[in-house]
Amino acid sequence: MMMYALAAVLLGVGLYGLLVKRHLLKKVLGLLIVEHAVNLFLIQLGYIDGGIAPIRTAGEEAAAFVGNAVDPLPQVLVLTSIVIGLGLAMLMVALTLRIYQRYGSLDADRMSELKG
Amino acid sequence: MNAFVVAPILILLAAGIVTQLAPVRWRRGIFVAGVTLHLVSAVFLFAQVEQSGPQAVHLGGWEAPLGIALVADLLAAVLVLLTALLGFAVTLALTRSSTHEDLRAGVPALVCFLLAGVDAAFLTADLFHLYVAFEILLLASFVLFVVGCDGERPRAAARYLLPAVLSSMLLLAGVGLLYGLTGTLSMTDAGARIAALGSTPAVGVVAAMLAVSFALKAAAFPVFAWLPASYPAVPSELAALFSGLLTKVGVYALVRVFTLVLPGELEWMGTLLLIVAGATMVFGVLGALAQWGMQRLLTFHVVSQVGYLLVGLGIGTVGALAATVYYLFHNSVAKTSLLLTTGQVRRRHGTDELRNLGGIARTDPWLAAFFLIAALGLAGIPPLSGFWAKLLVLDSAAEAGSWAILGVAAAVGVLTLLSMAKIWTTAFWGEGAEGRRAGTGLLALLPTFLLVLVVVGLGLFAGPALAIAERAAADLLDGTAYVDALRRAAP
């Protein structure tokens, strides 16, 4: 339960950064924090307190294994999502850099003042 | 293993990789060849699905609950055909408009990957795979946004990217929650287990998260602002591709998920969807009317038309969903054609500001004629496709007794005509500012001509087209054909 609450807090922090902050880099960081919150939430779904890694060794009883092993699927999902997130993060940072080079400012409000 | 179902995606991925590896001077040719092959494969897929019902493939030989399945039912096949058609037309236009720099930066590969992502989103029967497909098309479209980096494009890219990523996160969290509830990611399995669970509050939360995420991608009210803030900045050919396909994938995801996985939730969401649909139509068209840039005006219209598409799901009958299917096809074709015309105008006159244009009908009669047909089609003048599309939406609204949405849709139809008249009277009619060259070349007009042909054809042969739309809608609501296809294809 603790960890779900942590994910919710992270989500709140990320959304705050994304929606309230005017600095574009802070918006990007907010979005990355939202991503981590979602990943943390997903990984909880398959977690069992005191569970074992979902790798079945020879001679291990099937019923006990299924009962104790954590669900590997959310881990796979999170892995995929982290990789996609990494690609997105690189693109967003590159874009931020390009915007700064071009307009000399990263202020989102000033960006929208200029006719866009 | 049914090769027809995977072929469209594989062809595009292969074409994308090959053009990127090839020397720059070969890229145009490989691009056109790949997209043409994709169109052929989409026609074959459509013919097969139309004749012998939905087709499925279990990727990697794993059966559906464990592995990922692709299913082409009639709706998916029609939409893959639409993707291929628009992709083909836009590719023809892009090969003419792309500079050496564009080719070097990889525009052909990016368009191929974008189309592959769109195809994958239409064909997948797995919720996580849907998220991945959205990310593929998002990444490809985002890089297309910044290629060249001229003018307003970096800024527009930021406005496009941040909401899109946020909606993807919402989708991912919603899919995760759904997995937590049902223990499966397969759409059919999840649907069966949700039906057994009944309409609990947790299911409601999942439905709300997915609906908001897809609405953001579809640019529905109240989360549409990113679209008119970003699409006007890209070249018209790319805007044509984005407007024709990207928001429609959001609408498709709404339709698919809320008929296959969460049909029970439509009961409380139906009315809400109709309100959203009405507001989307009104805000989109009012925004469009206020614009003086051709591309700006047309991209605002994308928002307005998404409203019409949502009416079908809000009402939820076979007739209403058939209207949505027909409307979606017609609207994407008409909108892409109009934006390709805008591209021609921009290139010839260096601007798409309506106040600086005039008399194109005299200097460039063919371009003007194609614009007029597509614009009248979009506005819904008989016997063009838009007339039947609007009639169907109004008819299904009347049948369901939703008089408010009927009134709004009719009024927005008139305003649509008015905004098309605004473009026509200022840019195409009246005194020309200057006519430097007479007529756009025939080859440059070909993509627009193809699409206009479809608009006219869909109108003249509305009967057969509507029959297909109705079958697609009936399959959607019934759902058994989709599940059967998965079972039949089981390895």
Image (cartoon, coloured by chain):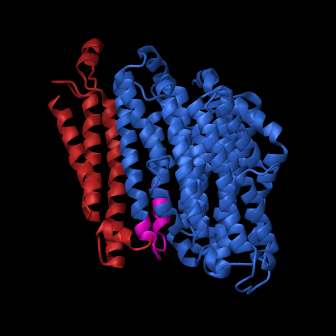
Chain colours: A red, B blue
Q: Give the main secondary structure, helix, strand or loop, of the magenta stretch.
A: helix
- Which of the 4 image quadrants contains residue B260? top right
In the picture, which quadrant includes the C terminus of chain B? Answer: top right
Of residue B44 and residue B374, the one placed in the foreground of this image is B374
Q: Is residue B471 left or right of residue B288?
A: right
Q: Is residue B106 visible?
A: no
| Image location (x, y in percent) of residue B488 | 63, 22
Instruction: Classify B51 as above or below B309.
Output: above
Please say whether residue B152 is one of the residues in the magenta stretch. Answer: yes
Q: Residue at x 74, y 73 (%)?
A: B428
Please say whether residue B114 is one of the residues in the magenta stretch. Answer: no
Range drawn in magenta? B139-156
| Image location (x, y in percent) of residue B80 | 65, 44
| Image location (x, y in percent) of residue B418 | 68, 59
Total marks shown come to 0
Of residue B30 and residue B336, the one placed in the foreground of this image is B336
In the picture, which quadrant includes the N terminus of chain B? Answer: top right
Instruction: Classify A17 as above or below A1.
Output: below
Q: Is residue B317 visible?
A: yes
Q: Residue at x 41, y 25 (%)?
A: B184
- Which of the 4 image quadrants contains residue B75? top right
| Image location (x, y in percent) of residue B97 | 64, 73
Q: Residue at x 58, y 23 (%)?
A: B490
Instruction: Classify B168 as above or below B422.
Output: above
